[in-house]
Structure formats: C-alpha cells, structure tokens
Amino acid sequence: MHSWHEFVTMGGYAPYVWPAYGIVFVVLLGAAWFARRDLRLALARAAHRAHEMHK
Amino acid sequence: MFTWFHKLGSPPLLYRLATRVSPWFMALTLILIVAGLVGGLVLAPPDYQQGDGFRIIYVHVPSAILSLMVFALMAGASAVGLIWRLRMAHAVTIAAAPIGAAFTFLALVTGSLWGKPMWGTYWVWDARLTSELVLLFLYFGAIAIIRAFSDQRTGDRAGAVFVLVGAVDLPIIHYSVQWWATLHQGATLKLSGSNMPTSMLWPLLTMMAAFTCYFIWLLVLRLRAEILRREWRASWVERLSAE
C-alpha cells in the first residue's frame, strides 16, 4: 500500500474486502462478549447457590 | 501413560487450568491479530491476478481451516467421551460447537464476498461450498441434540454419536476440490508447503495463529462456564464461589 486512498479503496475491491473484515470482527467480538457474559452468569449462579446452601 | 489424560478429566483441575491459560491466549490473540492485519492489509503486495481483492484470504482461510479443525476436535472429544466415559470430554464438545459454527459461518460469508468479484457470483452449489454449508448445519444439529435432553448424559451421548457420524463431512470438504470439478481453488496451505511468496504467506500464517489462539481463549472461557453449569452441586464449586 502506497497511499491512504489506495488502502481505503482496496484497488476497487473495497465493497468486498471491508465488509468481509467487518463481519469477521463483529462475529468474533460478539462471540467473545457472549462467552464472557455466560461465564459471569455461571459464576454468579454458583455464588448464589453457595450462599443459599449456607443459609 | 494416560495419567495426564485422566487428570484432565477432573473438573476442578480442568477449570483451574482453563482459568490459568485464558489471559495468555487473549493477549496472544491481540498481538497476533494486530500483526496479521498490518501484514495482510498494508504490507502484503496486491496479487497479480486478483489485485487487492485477494486480501480477503487473510480472514477467509483461517475461518475455513478452523471450521474443520474445531469439528475434528469435537469428534475427538466425542470419541474420548464415549470410549473412556470422561464427562469433561463432552463438555469440551458443547463448549467448542458454537465457536466452530461461528467460524463456518464466517468462512461461508467471506468466501461469498470473495467469490462475487472473482467468479461473478456470491454463491454456487458446488461441492466445496455445499459441503461447508452442510458443516454449518452439522454444528447446529450437534448443539440442538446435546441441549435437547433433560438428562445431560443422554444428550452428551446422542450428541457424541451425531458428531462422530457428521465427521464424515470433513474429508468430503477437504477433498471436494480434487474429487469434483468446482469453482473453488485448491488448498492454499499444504503440509508440503505453499506457492505463495513469503510477503503474502507470513501474514496468512500469523492470522492462522491469531484465529487459533482466539479459538483456544474462547474455548476455555466457554468450558469454564460449562463446567460450572454441570458441576454446580460439587463441593469444589461451592468453595470456589465462597472465595
């Protein structure tokens, strides 16, 4: 890549290259967010059960 | 000989190991993905035939390879779960399935976006594309079957059999470009090497490593949640929660 314009337009392939990268990063970030949320929920549930058992 | 293998079948040990390795794989993923993106989008020269359109390879090939590898891992874990009755092997299968489905979806979508400017169409029902689509449905099927039973063990066993039968799709996907006349090109990366010049190859290998680290990071996150879900009655979970 020799210029910013070249980078953005991707030699005319921008309508294909950027959506491909965009979808990949949305899906990968989304999957990571869901995995972390599931783990947080599982930890909270386990803590709640432990608390209930000690009552 | 298999002592380490059986140790990994211990939920608290596997949970602790997953907790320990998780931040390392997250850090590795971030470093490798930045290096791979700079290499693939900025430093690699345009292809002499496909121009800059070929840069989709840096997300398409890692997604496609991981889509196969994850299902192969699930098949291995299913076999271990069925043969040695290791419950944690089944936990690995269900933890890996949604990640594998995501990679398969990405392989299909990025392949489609690459296919339009190169083949003139987003989709053709050729052997490679169709067998990859079948793999996506196999992932959905495995998740649905494992979660369909109220008894976890029945679901695990049914899912394991389904995954082992479904694994027959893996060689079909891999060899489809050799067995049938397809629009899809042959393998980019082979065990015997690659025809790509180094300036194009290293970003691809870096992105492969980044996607693999991402998969391991996500797998251990999902595995920890799955272990807690399955072992919530165990005393070690109670102690963990009290900490």
Image (cartoon, coloured by chain):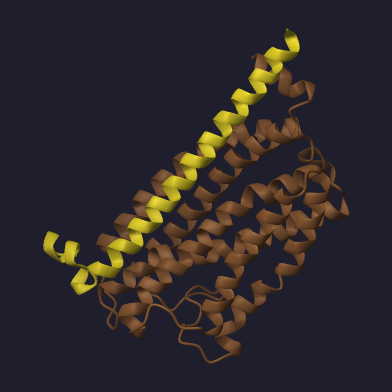
Chain colours: A yellow, B brown
Residue B197 appears in view? no
Residue B186 lies left or right of residue B40; in this view the side is right
- Image quadrant assignment for residue B218: top right
- Image quadrant assignment for residue B227: top right
Percent x, y of residue B132: 56, 72
- Which residue occupies the foreground of this view, B80 or B7? B80
Percent x, y of residue B139: 63, 61
Q: Residue, x 35% and y 68% (percent of image)?
A: B56
Residue B35 appears in view? yes
Percent x, y of residue B100: 57, 57
Judge whether B73 appears above or below B17 on screen: below
Q: Residue, x 53% and y 40% (percent of image)?
A: A35
Q: State the count of labels.
A: 0
Judge whether A41 appears above or below A23 on screen: above
Residue B214 lies left or right of residue A4; in this view the side is right
Percent x, y of residue B123: 43, 79
Residue furthest top in the image: A55
Quadrant of the frame with the C terminus of chain B: top right
Judge whether A33 appears above or below B55 on screen: above
- Which residue occupies the foreground of this view, B37 or B72? B72
- Which residue occupies the foreground of this view, B184 or B148? B148
Q: Residue, x 74% and y 58% (percent of image)?
A: B76
Judge whether B109 appears above or below B226 on screen: below
Q: Residue, x 29% and y 73% (percent of image)?
A: B53
